[in-house]
Amino acid sequence: VLNYTANPEINGDKYCEGAVIDTVNFEHLMQNHADLDEVWVIKITDYESIKPPQNLLDAELLAVMLPFTTIADDDIKLFKYHLKEQGDTTKVVEIGMRYDELNYHWSYANLDKGIEVGYQGAKATIADYS
């Protein structure tokens, strides 16, 4: 049986996952670092590579996380659009990853795998970039 917890309230303030409010916060990045030449983006997942759930737990995890994959894609597209509209020449480099090796399990094993896949993706992107 899976149990969900409500967002906690502390001293009258409610707290929730930051991605619920602002999944990919590019606006503040550019406001606080307007002199950037490049922004490198690595997504933690890609909706096109998500495997069908194998059990109820997989289905529950997908239900929670799946919307964030498309929201992140949309935020990246909007960021590029806003840069172009403002005449900003900041280059956006997206790091490719082998997303098919990852899942939504909240485990240290999956975290370690995600770090390794991200590292390998960054190395490959740097090699291609050079």
Image (cartoon, rainbow, N blue to C red):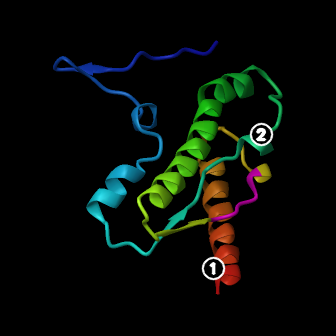
Nearer the observer, 127 or 82 = 82
Residue 61 percent across, percent down from the top left: 65, 28
SS label for mark 2: loop
Q: Which residue is mark 1?
A: 126
Real-space Cα separation, disc 1 to disc 2, in angstroms: 25 Å
The secondary element bearing badge 1 is classed as helix
Density class for disc 2 (Cα within 10 Å; few <14, some 14-19, many ≥20) is some
Instruction: Judge whether 71 appears above or below 38 on screen.
Output: above
Q: How many marks?
A: 2
Instruction: Give the main secondary structure, helix, strand or loop, of the magenta stretch.
Output: loop
Q: As drawn, is 14 to the left or to the right of 84? A: left
> Measured from the top left, where is residue 40 in percent x and y?
52, 66
Numbered tag placed on residue 28 in the rendering: none
Crowding near the residue tagged with mark 1, few <14, some 14–19, many ≥20 C-alpha atoms within 10 Å: few
Residue drawn 61% across and 45% down? 73
Q: Is residue 54 above or below residue 126?
A: above
Q: Nearer the viewer, residue 65 or 8?
A: 65
Residue 96 at x, y = what percent?
Answer: 69, 63
Residue occupying image coordinates x 65% and y 24%:
63
The answer to which of 14 and 58 lies nearer the viewer is 14
Which span is picked out in magenta? Answer: 95-99
Amino acid under label 1? Answer: Ile
Q: Residue furthest left?
A: 11
Give the residue at x 68% y 62%.
117
Q: Amino acid at mark 2?
A: Ile
The single residue placed furthest to the bottom in the displayed view is 130
Reading the image, the residue beneath label 2 is 50
In this view, 94 is above or below 105: below
Residue plotted at (32% across, 26% down): 15
Q: Is residue 53 left or right of residue 6?
A: right
